[in-house]
Image: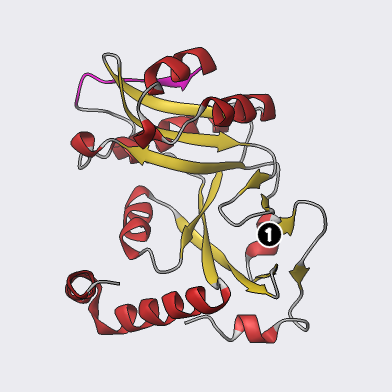
Amino acid sequence: MQLNELVQELERFGGVKTFQSVGLRALHRLAGARILKGVKLDAVDPEFVKCDKPYHGQFLDQALLTELTRNHPEYEMSKRFLRDAFEKGDECYGFLDGRVLAAYGWYSNSPTAIDAPGMMLHFDPRYIYMYKGFTQAEYRGQRLHAIAMTRALDAYLAKGYKGLVSYVEWNNFGSLKSCYRSGYQDFGNIYLARFFGRYVTHAGGGCATYSFRLEHSHEVLTCNDSQAPHLGARAH
């Protein structure tokens, strides 16, 4: 972390959270340690349904997304990603400003890979997993991501699902603040670390209610409370 980033974090979040964040980053460098905070959204807030700007919100198909994201690496949507996501049955809800994709989020009802090689996030299939949210820089500050999530939630509730689940890095205080403002609530943490090249995880209290856990793509590596107290002890 650069000095100016440290100062900004101190100013925004205070000394205690900044100290905890620095410690977690150090553990991440040493052993790939991360804490993933599970959050849920199960009620539609009318404040986050109406969009004040003339943007068009909708679920976007593969052909349209391919066209909109072509030659725009900032979206992080390669042809392979789009092919795999749609083959898996995932959906993308986004806001369009004309032919510009202003904001989007992805939604899945099946186990989904996270950014830890070989690890899959599992969850109760009565819920929809929200991931990969993004807003173009020039559209930020308009609550488009929160509105898109709320509209997607409304659509999934109408289909009989119980709500959305997602995760935020424990020390991503800015994103957590945005989630809470949108109505998300914590339900538990997943602790993740790498030992001798293999990931080990521990799903903390509350995660079982939503079957929220990490598994290796080929074998389960999740520990129970008695097997991995050292991971639980790293929570701050």
The vertical placement of 163 against 219, above or below, is: above
The residue at the point 44 percent across, 80 percent down is 26
Which of the 4 image quarters holds residue 234? Answer: bottom right
Quick check: 170 left or right of 97?
right
Observer-nearest residue: 47 or 232? 232
Image quadrant in which the N terminus is located: bottom left
The residue at the point 22 percent across, 34 percent down is 139
Observer-nearest residue: 145 or 71? 71
Can residue 46 be seen in this snapshot?
no
The residue at the point 40 percent across, 21 percent down is 70
The residue at the point 42 percent across, 41 percent down is 133
Q: Where is residue 181 in the image (x, y as percent from the top left)?
A: 32, 53
Quick check: 180 left or right of 214?
left
What's the residue type where badge 1 is placed? Arg
Q: Where is residue 210 in the image (x, y as percent from the top left)?
A: 66, 55
Q: Is mark 1 on a helix, strand or loop?
A: strand
Q: Where is residue 21 in the image (x, y as percent from the top left)?
A: 38, 76
The vertical placement of 53 against 7, above or below, is: above
Q: Where is residue 158 in the image (x, y as percent from the top left)?
A: 56, 27
Q: What's the colour scheme? A: secondary structure
Q: How many marks?
A: 1
Task: Residue lying at the far right in this picture: please name it.
Answer: 219
Magenta residues span 53-61
Observer-nearest residue: 232 or 25? 25
Q: Answer whether residue 228 is magenta in the image.
A: no
Observer-nearest residue: 99 or 91? 99
Quick check: 118 left or right of 69?
right
Which of the 4 image quarters holds residue 51? Answer: top left
Residue at the disc numbered 1: 213
Quick check: 12 left or right of 74?
left
Can residue 162 be seen in this snapshot?
yes
